[in-house]
């Protein structure tokens, strides 16, 4: 079977953590005039991309532990998720916002970070939605997600996971 290529229309975007993606989609569409570009998974979205005049904003919920496992998150990612959920509940600066920055090659960028003694929160990994990402927190707690398009999407996790 041929690998599905992921076409990235908006190379840099902001992701906001929200309590309910479906509710937020309605607000962004109905009250702000955004158009829904895509959402995942289709039956109960926990992630959505919306566009207004060529600018993209993504909305995401913090997944439950069961959803995290279903999405293929490993132990280290789940520990970061737990940390994020605790911090999000306290509401400190930076929690819930991720800034995605396109780079030509995430793995080459990771090597540059290592030379600069910058340790990522999560090492480079191809995500279920088709991006290869490397995550770094800035000094104020904002998550910077450096990414490039993956060569191929990883296999979908089994539905009963």
Image: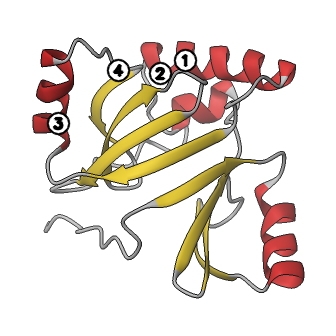
Q: Secondary structure at mark 1?
A: helix
Q: Is residue 77 above or below residue 107?
A: above
Q: Nearer the viewer, residue 111 or 157?
A: 111
Question: Alpha-carbon distance for marks 2 and 4?
Answer: 12 Å
Residue 96, given in percent of the width and then of the height, sits at: 69, 37
Q: Nearer the viewer, residue 126 or 33?
A: 33
Q: Secondary structure at mark 3?
A: helix
Q: Identify the residue position indicated by label 2 in the image.
A: 77
Q: Residue 159's spot in the image, x, y percent? A: 53, 45
**Marks 2/3: CA distance?**
20 Å
Q: Residue 120, labelled with which disc?
A: 4
Q: Earlier in the sequence, mark 4 or mark 3?
A: 3
**What is the count of numbered marks?**
4
Instruction: Please provide percent x and percent y for residue 14.
Output: 56, 56
Residue at 55 percent of width and 71 percent of height: 56
User: Which quadrant, please, contains the N terminus?
Assistant: bottom left
Dot 3: few (<14), some (14–19), or many (≥20) neighbours within 10 Å?
some
Q: Earlier in the sequence, mark 2 or mark 4?
A: 2
The residue that disc 3 covers is: 109
How far, Cα to Cα, is label 4 from label 3?
11 Å
Decide if residue 161 is in sight here: no
Which residue, given by chain and number where applicable, does mark 1 sit on?
80
Report the side of 60 relative to 12 (left or right). right
Element type where label 2 sits in the image: helix
Q: Earlier in the sequence, mark 3 or mark 1?
A: 1
7 versus 92 height, above or below = below
């Amino acid at each position: 079977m041929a690998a599905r290529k992921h076409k990235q229309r908006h190379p840099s975007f902001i992701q906001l953590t929200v309590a309910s993606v479906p509710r937020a989609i309605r607000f962004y569409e109905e009250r702000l005039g955004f158009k829904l570009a895509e959402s995942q998974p289709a039956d109960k979205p926990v992630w959505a991309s919306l566009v207004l005049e060529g600018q993209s904003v993504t909305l995401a919920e913090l997944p439950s532990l069961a959803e995290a496992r279903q999405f293929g998150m490993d132990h280290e990612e789940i520990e970061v998720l737990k940390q994020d959920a605790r911090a999000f509940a306290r509401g400190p600066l930076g929690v819930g916002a991720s800034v995605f920055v396109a780079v030509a090659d995430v793995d080459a960028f990771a090597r540059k970070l290592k030379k600069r003694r910058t340790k990522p929160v999560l090492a480079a990994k191809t995500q279920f939605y088709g991006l290869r990402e490397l995550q770094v927190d800035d000094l104020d707690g904002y998550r910077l997600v450096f990414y490039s398009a993956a060569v191929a999407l990883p296999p979908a996790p089994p539905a009963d996971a």
